[in-house]
Amino acid sequence: MGNYLKMIKRWDIILITILVLISFLPFTIFSVVQAKSNNDPNNINVAVISVDNKVVKRIVLTGNVKTQQFDVHDLGGDCNTIEVKKNRIRVKSADCPDQNCVLTGFISKPGQTIVCLPHRVVIEIKSNHEPSQDIIVSS
Amino acid sequence: MTKNQLNAYIALLAAQAVVISMFENAIPFPFAVAPGAKLGLANIITCMALYTLSTKDTLKVLTIRLILATLLGGTISTFMYSAAGIVLSFLGMWLVKKLGPDRVSLIGVSTTGAILHNIGQLIVASWIAQTWTVLLYLPVLSFAGILAGIAIGVMANYLLNHVEKLHNYRSLRELNE
């Protein structure tokens, strides 16, 4: 063991440190870019509410200060009550059996969704800048 | 070394690298923490080639290894991944080795190779997926690469010092420089 420790030279350690720092570089750039785009005034988040794949309402969330509340009816006449509070949106109450949409709570970031499967109601937040999405790569 | 000896030695190293990498593919990776991380045992061969052969002959070993490994159980996409990894890691290892044996040991060379191999593969992956978020995975792979690189460096060092032929070839190469 001692022989192997003696094998390590000073430049080995310098090189490994540099390489580790380089490997964190994409991470740093990514966080900086993301922080910039979150503070970007041109970035506008829009909540798109659709029933059965048809868009029924668009609400601009960025810069919104009011609180508003309205009902969305699906084809069968069932009702989801949606509340918009400042830049966040949620389903306040619904008469669906599973209540998943209500339990999701408020969403505010691009890419987030609230889905009410029984009523086929989808609320999705879209941004004029496409958000980065998680992907899976297999080789 | 005569020309025949040299050819046989290059062929031997390439064949060993192919067999080792196929053998390694057969081992299921035990750690679920870092999927995609590999030991990179074939890196031993690259290290040995770098230390016993000229740059031109090392490149020959790597090219033969790349083509053979692809023909023996790869696809175009694995070819692209390994090609990027091999080219980048060879460049890095070659440059690092230029620092000289007084400054840098085999551990440094093999760790550089391991990490740059990962970087090359992830660059190709992010190019294929058309998003560079893949590169965020780099720190995890680098950590695995450092551990594997140290182990490979110690192994290659042991082989170079204790296998008589390798030892001779290494001294021969150092004389020629």
Image (cartoon, coloured by chain):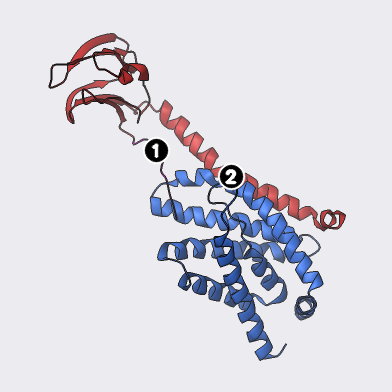
Chain colours: A red, B blue
Residue at numbered disc 1? A132
Q: Residue at x 24, y 17 (%)?
A: A96
Q: Is residue B71 above or below residue A101?
A: below
Q: CA distance from mark 2 to mark 1?
A: 20 Å
Position of residue A30 measured from the top left corner of the image (x, y, whole percent) = 49, 38
Position of residue B72 measured from the top left corner of the image (x, y, whole percent) = 48, 72
Q: Is residue B81 above or below residue B137?
A: below
Q: Amino acid at mark 1?
A: Ser
Q: Nearer the viewer, residue B37 or B116?
A: B37
Badge count: 2
Residue A133 occupies quadrant: top left
- Classify residue B132 as left or right of residue A62: right
Residue A43 occupies quadrant: top left
Q: Is residue B28 above or below residue B176?
A: above
The part of the chain drawn in magenta is: A130-136
Q: Amino acid at mark 2?
A: Val
> The N terminus of chain B lies in which quarter of the figure?
bottom right
Q: Residue under mark 2: which chain is it in?
A: B
Q: Residue under mark 1: which chain is it in?
A: A
Residue at numbered disc 2? B140
